[in-house]
Image: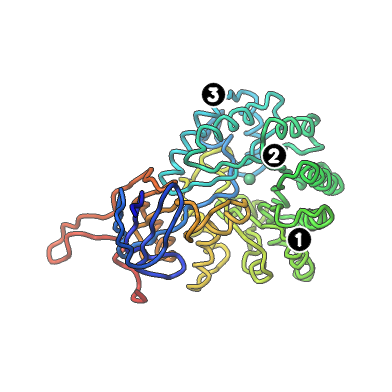
Amino acid sequence: MSFDLLVKNADLPDGRTGIDIACLDGRIVAVETGITADAAEVIDATAKLVSPPFVDSHFHMDATLSLGLPRMNQSGTLLEGIALWGELKGILTVDAVVERALKYCDLAVSQGLLAIRTHVDVCDDKLSGVQGLLEVREKVKDYIDLQLVAFPQDGLYRSPSAETNLLKALDMGVDIVGGIPHFERTMDDGAKSVRRLCEIAAERGLMVDMHCDETDDPMSRHIETLAYETQRLGLQGRVAGSHLTSMHSMDNYYVSKLLPLIAEAEVHAIANPLINITLQGRHDTYPKRRGQTRVSEMRSYGINVAFGHDCVMDPWYSMGSGDMLEVASMGLHVAQMTSREEIRYCYDCVTSHPAKAMGLEGYGLEKGCKADFVLLQARDTIEAIRLKAARLAVIKSGKVIATSEPRQTRLAIEGRPGLVNPADYAPKEH
Ligand SMILES: [Zn+2]
C-alpha cells in the first residue's frame, strides 16, 4: 500500500498525540499510531498541532480589500460604513471585484482558511458583486469551498429593487438567502422580511443566513421571528442568525425565553467578534457595552455558535488579515471565556462549528474525511490561539498548497539562548 501523503506524529485538536494521518485520492484513509507504509510525501509533525482547516462562516468578499475607496470611514460606525459602501457600489466593476476577491483568497489559503461563506450585496441593479463572486467561486473551487449568500444590504423592502435582484441572484446560482431585518423601515417590515425570505428559501430548498439584530437596541427581536419561521417552514438546521448583537442588551428574562426557542429551531448563531467589539456601543458614553452576543449562554443551551471574520480592510473595518485565530482570540476576550476548556471551545468556533453551520461535507480529521488540514507551529489549540501560530503547511485534497517558515528570532544577548521559538513557551501540561 502506498499513500499520497503521510503525516507522522501529529497532535490533534481533541488532545490525542503522536498520531499518523494517511491520505489517498483526496481523502483521509487512516488516523492511527505507527503507520509504516510508503507515501509519495511525508510530513514530520512531531510536537505540532494538525487541525482541520479554518472556516469563516461570515464574510463580505465583494467589499474586501477596498479600504480607502472612494474614501475612509471617518466615524468608524456601521451606518457610515453602509453609506460609504453605497458610494463604492455605484462604481464597482466585475473585474475589480474578481481581482480583490482572488487576492483575498490567496491570503486565506496562506492562513489555512479553506472554507468561506460570503454575503454578496444584491442591492445594485447591475449585480456586479454577484457576477464577480460567482466567477471567483468557480475559479477557487479546487482550493476554497466558497458559499455565496444573497444579501439585500439596503433592506428587502427599504430598497425598491432588492427583492427582484435577490431572486435574480438566486437564479444565477447564489447558494443562500440572506436578509437584514433590523435595517428595514419598521419592526413590522423587518418581521415581514424574515417571513418572506424564509419562504423563498423553503420554496427553493436553500439555506438561510441573515444579518439579524446587528444593533444595540434591546427591542430588536428579529431572531425570535427567525427561529419561529425556521420551525414553521421545517428549515431546522439550515438557518443561521448572524451578529445577534441586540441580545447583549436584552432583558435577561426575555433572553431566558428566547434561547430555548433558538435551540429548538436549531438555528446556528454566528458572532463576529472583531467587528462587533468595534461597531457596537458607539452611542454609549460610559459604561460602554461590548455588544457581542451571548456566546456562553447560547452554548449552555446547545446552540451551535461560530465566530466569523466579517470584514478585512473594507468600509466597515480597516484591520484584519484572514487569520481566524485572531478572530477566536478576540471572541474569547470579549466573551470572557478564559478557562482552558472555554478557550478550546473558542477554537471550535472557527473550525468545526462554522463547518456545521455551513453544512460542509467530509470536514474533520476522521477516516473518510476530506484530506484537508493545517500544520501549525503550536502544541495544541490553546497555544495556537495564544500565538496566532504560523501555518507551516496547508494541505488540500492530500496536496500541500501552502507552506511557511517557522516563526523564530535570533537573539544576540550574551549568556541567553541564541534562538527564541514562541512555540517553546507552552505550559507544562505537555
Ligand atoms: Zn456581515
The quarter of the image that holds ligand 1 is: top right
Residue 170 visible somewhere in the drawing: yes
Picture quarter containing residue 153?
Answer: top right
Q: Is residue 88 above or below residue 51?
A: above
Q: Would residue 286 be visible to someone looking at this image?
A: no
Q: Nearer the viewer, residue 393 or 70?
A: 393
Task: Report the disc number at residue 95.
Answer: 3
- Residue that label 2 marks: 151
Marks 2/1: CA distance? 22 Å
Going by the numbered disc 1, the residue's amino acid type is Ala
Q: Which amino acid type corresponds to the residue marked 3 in the rendered image?
A: Asp
Give the SS element for disc 2.
strand
The amino acid on which the numbered mark 2 sits, given as a three-letter code, is Phe
Above or below, 82 relative to 17: above
**Mark 3, secondary structure of its residue:** helix
Q: Tag 1: Cα neighbours inside 10 Å, few (<14), some, or many (≥20)?
A: many
